[in-house]
Amino acid sequence: MRTIITVLILGGLAACAPSGPGAGPAPATDSTPDTAGSDAAWTDGDAAELEGGARPGDDLPEGLPGVFSRSDDSPPVPDAEVTAFTQEVLDFLAEIRYFDYVLYTTHGVDASTGLRDWQFWYNERFRKEGELVTFFHPENPDDGGHNLHIPLSRVLGDALAAALLTEDPAASLAATQLCKGMSASMLGMVHDGQDPLPHLMARNVVAFNHEFTTHDGKRKAVDYSGWFSEYERWNCARFPYEENPEWGLTWVTSMRSKDDVCHLFRLVPSLRYASSRAMDAGLREACGETLTLLEAFAKDIVDSGYRIRTKDRDGVPFMPGFTGDPEVDQQQGDLSSFVHWNALIPGAECNNRRAAELIASHAGGAEDCGTGEPNLYDQAAFEINRYNKRICQYFHLAHLANALVNRDDAAAMRLLEGLEVRMTQDLGLPEAEMQYAPDDHRRNMALFLAQSQAFGYPLTGDEVRLIHTYYRRAVERTRDWPYWDPWDASVPDLEEASYRPPDCATEGEETLCWWRVEDLAQLFETCWSPFTNPSGARYVDCDLVRKAGR
């Protein structure tokens, strides 16, 4: 197998989205695709067809379609230990006021401006001056916020779950505002009032500087000035759209790669339940719009030959890797394509394509991905760039999640089988082949296990212990982080700092990691999900979680 992989590498296998330019010409499955008709506007009729036809609304599933279990030779985790762990996490989230923190540190456009409001998950810096805290974007002439939809989709999914499960008002407001932020990443890339494509997604958008008050009355300002500059790289470009219909002058970073798309796709089932069943009308409306836009985004991918389109500085849509410039197309490679390697590796990225189809039309199309388990593409892509493993993992999970919510039952049960194969391989990966620090790899696997449990994957006792290790470590390592409330009197004036806590530390020659801040409320998704498998070991006491916020 390694010989075959080496041949592929030498033949110019480009890395997936996070990588740099490919080393050689990348084989495509066809010539420049026929996109006739794909520039047509996404109309109200299209949205109505989804809402009244394909989208099942209150006919959403209430559980798994069948029985899937795994053998478990590991010692069971005592119920008392699970309950103690759960209480520890809930106490921590309450202590740091987690969803208030989410609302404090996300930003976009405030409703006090009179314009459409939204909040988005950025990873920048803040500065306190008396009662005013400014969240600012440092000058960044050729970079900035390329894959922010990964943490955004994760914290949004957990906020949605908390709102649906407990009706916590801070979680509900956070979910509402972040749904609006997700929508803004598409609506912000509308060039002008004549642009017919409101659903193509930017890497990020930023609007204008302004000051306002938070949901609980604190003085807050946002300063995007450091991102008010143009640049162009092989994998993205930043430029202004001066006549955006919603916000006027808006700065856009284009060329949404597929790094984030697997996480976005995994979020879609949660959006479907929230837009149908949330008690809060504002949440239903905001997340319903996000759902409609993401369904249109997925439909555009399918209609464009399974490629993610973007727009240039003039608002003209194009496909990265198919610009007609040989040098540019070689560099962009499979940045935004789900079919780039099909001719070379049959079945490559099948999970990506079928997940897109399920979101776009609520049907899986003619392609059969079987169990969705790793194939030669997964192995080769990981050897080229380590992050590709996580892309492949989460497209598998997104495929499973959307198969479940669309009642594609036979496919879902087979995908669970393949997920067990994938988990076994990835958990058993020798340290020498991990490409991450071993503790970083295991941290990532612990989160993947917990997120997979929410979509039918049963856990073993040892996997529960792995989750507890990295989840509990996050509580221990970040409890005393000084910036959960940037307005707190303990925060010095004029001090500039990141508003995201660390998630790894070097101790001697060892790197220790714990769950990232965007994943701290994962237990809400686990306990809310209708697809959590009762046959597996439980890592969280959901009776306790359901009482939180009530």
Image (spheres, helix red, strand yellow):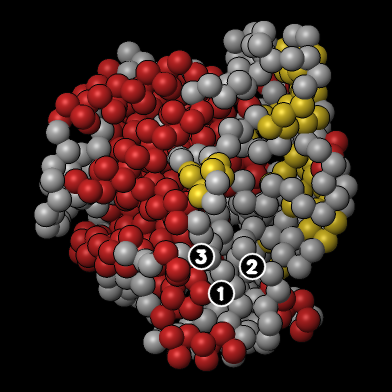
Q: Residue at x 56, y 59 (%)?
A: 259
Q: Residue at x 34, y 33 (%)?
A: 523
Q: Which residue is mark 1?
A: 384
The amino acid type of the residue labelled 1 equals Ile
Nearest to the observer: residue 82 or residue 284: 82
Quarter occupied by the N terminus: bottom left
Q: Residue at x 60, y 10 (%)?
A: 216
Q: Which residue is mark 3?
A: 435
* Mark 1 or mark 3: whose residue is earlier in sequence: 1
Residue 178 x, y percent position in the rendering = 56, 33
Residue 153 x, y percent position in the rendering = 51, 43
Q: Secondary structure at mark 1?
A: helix
Above/below status of 350 relative to 472:
below
Between the C-alphas of marks 1 and 3, the distance is 10 Å
Q: Is residue 508 visible?
A: yes
Q: Secondary structure at mark 3?
A: loop
* Mark 1 or mark 2: whose residue is earlier in sequence: 2
Answer with the quarter of the image where residue 62 lies: top left
The amino acid type of the residue labelled 3 equals Gln
Q: Are marks 1 and 2 in contact (CB under 8 Å)?
A: yes
Q: Is residue 201 left or right of residue 427?
A: right
Nearest to the observer: residue 403 or residue 194: 403
Q: Is residue 308 left or right of residue 84?
A: right
Q: Secondary structure at mark 2?
A: loop
Nearest to the observer: residue 47 or residue 316: 316
